[in-house]
Image (spheres, rainbow, N blue to C red):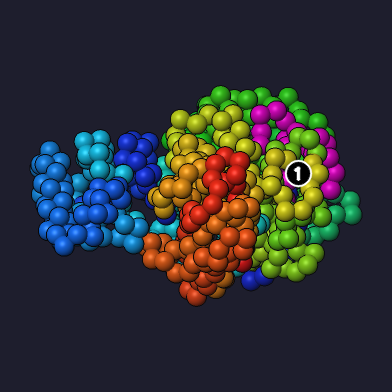
Amino acid sequence: MKYCNQWAPLFLRSRLAIALGMALSTAFAAQDVAVNGKPINTDRIIVKYRADAISSSVLASPNSATAVATLQSERQGRMQAAGSQLGVSVKFVRGTGLGAQVWKLDRARPLTEVAAMASRIAKSDPTVEYAEPDRLLHHMAAAPNDSHWFEQWDLQNTSVGINVLGAWDHSTGTGVNVAVIDTGYRPHADLAANVVGGYDMVNDVVMSNDGDGRDADASDPGDATNEGECGVGEPATHSSWHGTHVAGTIAAIANNGIGVAGIAPGAKIVPMRVLGRCGGYTADIADAMIWASGGEVTGLPHNTHPARVLNLSLGGGGACDVTSQNAIDAARANGAVVVVAAGNETRDVSRSSPANCSGVIAVAAYGKTGTRAYYSNFGNLVDISGPGGDQSTGDSDGTLSILNNGLSAPGADSYAYYQGTSMAAPHVSAVAALMISAKPSLTPDEVESLLKSSAKPFVASCRGCGAGMLDAYAAVQAAIGGTRPPAGSNEVEPNNSMETANEVLAPATMSGTIALALDKDYFKVTVPARHTLVGKLTSPKKADYDLYLYDAEGNQVAKSILGEGRVDVASVKNYTSTSAVYYARVVYESGLTGSTNGMYTLNLSW
């Protein structure tokens, strides 16, 4: 029988088997020039000419056709002159529903070059309202084809989901290693390709359950125990495969047609086995933090896969000890973000270590309803909350990830719902990986600050739950310097085109202003599968503003133009089996405008 100062995994066991570019071309200097390492090219450019480029009197004259043809010929000449600087020829393709024109280059060029060309066009021709690359978008942000994707409520774009699809427009975690400091891993078909390096740090042979001490094999042999083995009165337990479940949440393979999708499927998992039968020792865990982050540990080889993020879904009672704090400090000095589960004892996190150590991101858990999970620790030391599940209302209200069906020794690959702050923490670790992949220069303190400042407001009262609910899309946007108004806030200018539309996390009510008669405001909404988007526009007194809805291609799908004193309501249903992007446009029709008299509200919901 073994009694020791050790930590255990923090979960409660239960199982069941595109972002468009900015409107002004000069803004592209700060935009992505590659997606998943592949350069972005385009062979088209969009030019919007000012409405007064040709007078209404000319258009009404008998010679209007000749005047328009002459004007278009002049535009062709100016476009060709601009294209010659890139060594390409340019021809007109078509007009758009928003009154712009699409021009085609005879071959694709890098996005940055086309953006520079667009900038020259806009600056040299006073009749141009704006010019920008016609950016070629891809379906990466569409729902992946993993068979259990729609059971992953925690990843969806809902009031309680983290909106991972929005984040994938900018980052999938490529180039970032995440160390899962846990029970090790099983080579699950939905994970194995995303595992690199790792180490078994468990020094005690009995605890390790694999017949040896430390070695380079971080695979999990199982942590099943007999009754009384971990202390008097302790019941027998089956193997948890806890580290495998955690690793799958972070980086399970996406779009492979099976199972689940990880939050950062482009990242790699560095498995660090520190927990075995009855838990794991502080010293082993401390060594794992140092080695995984790229530090040197006596007797161990150099780590050729240093991790930028460390996930510790483990803990125990008491104050933060010196060994743990020193290891955390060393890992942070190596550039690693340290994410720790807050604990499952329904008490103040100040009594749970290492979540109460300095420099960590302590994560509480909420369930499918958005309320704090019944088991989750709380308190002033909690930094943020993530989806951890709450199976008091049903097993499927936990979080779904990969597992193994062996009760003691390893069996076949499987999937299971678990609940716990152990499940919430890897959501945060994975989003940290997305952020670092999008902006590798981020420091641990910057990652923590951005995670907290971009968090969503709680949908229910949640004292001691940190800055808010994890929002993957907003966190990545914050990392790359993007602008997104939080739900229920004011519009952020410029948003006078689809390309600069404010992203709205619906359901939400936005406040906006029509400053001038020519002003127009765009809002972008991702609508879940088979949901109906409903927009309700309330214009100011003595004003008539109208509401239009468009699909992702700019096709008008609904409108409401009821007149002064009426609430405009327009709706569109997403009949597809995947989420879809729609745009709402608020435009001036008549009446007052300005910073005070032009204020309106737009409710977007389903």
Label 1: how many Cα within 10 Å (few below 14, some 14–19, many 20+)? many
Dividing the image into 4 quarters, which one contains the C terminus? bottom right
* 77 relative position to 533: left or right: left
In this rendered view, identify the residue nearer to me: 348 or 107: 107
Residue lying at 50% horizontally and 31% vertically, measured from the top left: 442
Specify the quadrant of the image occupied by residue 84: top left
Q: What's the magenta region? A: 345-365
Q: Is residue 140 above or below residue 433?
A: below
Residue 164, percent from left and from top: 53, 54
Residue 535 appears in view: no
Q: Is residue 186 above or below residue 393?
A: above
Q: Is residue 583 above or below residue 500?
A: below
Q: Is residue 404 above or below residue 106?
A: below
In this rendered view, identify the residue nearer to me: 136 or 541: 541
Residue 513, percent from left and from top: 55, 45
* Residue furthest bottom as drawn: 575
Specify the quadrant of the image occupied by residue 215: top right
In the image, residue 364 lies in the stretch drawn in magenta: yes
Q: Which residue lies under the disc numbered 1?
A: 465
Residue lying at 79% horizontally and 50% vertically, measured from the top left: 461
In this rendered view, identify the residue nearer to me: 139 or 398: 139
Residue 310, percent from left and from top: 58, 39
Q: Secondary structure at mark 1?
A: loop
Which amino acid, by three-letter code, is at mark 1? Answer: Cys
In the image, residue 136 lies in the stretch drawn in magenta: no
* 178 relative position to 67: left or right: right
Specify the quadrant of the image occupied by residue 354: top right
